[in-house]
Amino acid sequence: MLFQDAPADTTGYMIAGYIITFTVMTIYVISLVSRWRNLQRDLDTLEELDK
């Protein structure tokens, strides 16, 4: 009688959580790639100045 109600449907929250997680991870990977490219550019500049 007391526990006859079904559990709350939290599927929407789970999907929203996955979307947020993957979005943050994608932004982080893009940031890492951008930093790596800038580092390579700086390294090339330093090597050119060293010559």
Image (cartoon, grey):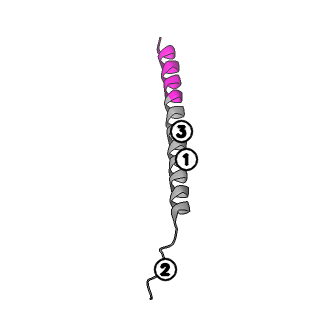
Front position among marks 2 and 3:
2
At a point 51% along the width and 72% down the height, the residue shown is 8
- Where disc 1 sits, the SS reads helix
Magenta-span inclusion, residue 35: no
Front position among marks 1 and 2:
2
Reading the image, the residue beneath label 2 is: 5
Mark 1 or mark 3, earlier in chain:
1
Q: CA distance from mark 1 to mark 2?
A: 35 Å
Please report the bounds of the magenta region as a residue range: 37-51
- Where disc 2 sits, the SS reads loop
Residue 18 drawn at (x, y percent): 50, 53
Front-most of residues 37 and 4: 4
| Callouts 1 and 2 close, C-beta under 8 Å | no
Mark 2 or mark 3, earlier in chain:
2
Please name the amino acid that badge 1 sits on.
Answer: Thr
Reading the image, the residue beneath label 1 is: 23
At a point 49% along the width and 37% down the height, the residue shown is 32
Which quadrant holds residue 1? bottom left
At a point 55% along the width and 47% down the height, the residue shown is 23
Reading the image, the residue beneath label 3 is: 31
Front-most of residues 44 and 28: 28
Please name the amino acid that badge 2 sits on.
Answer: Asp
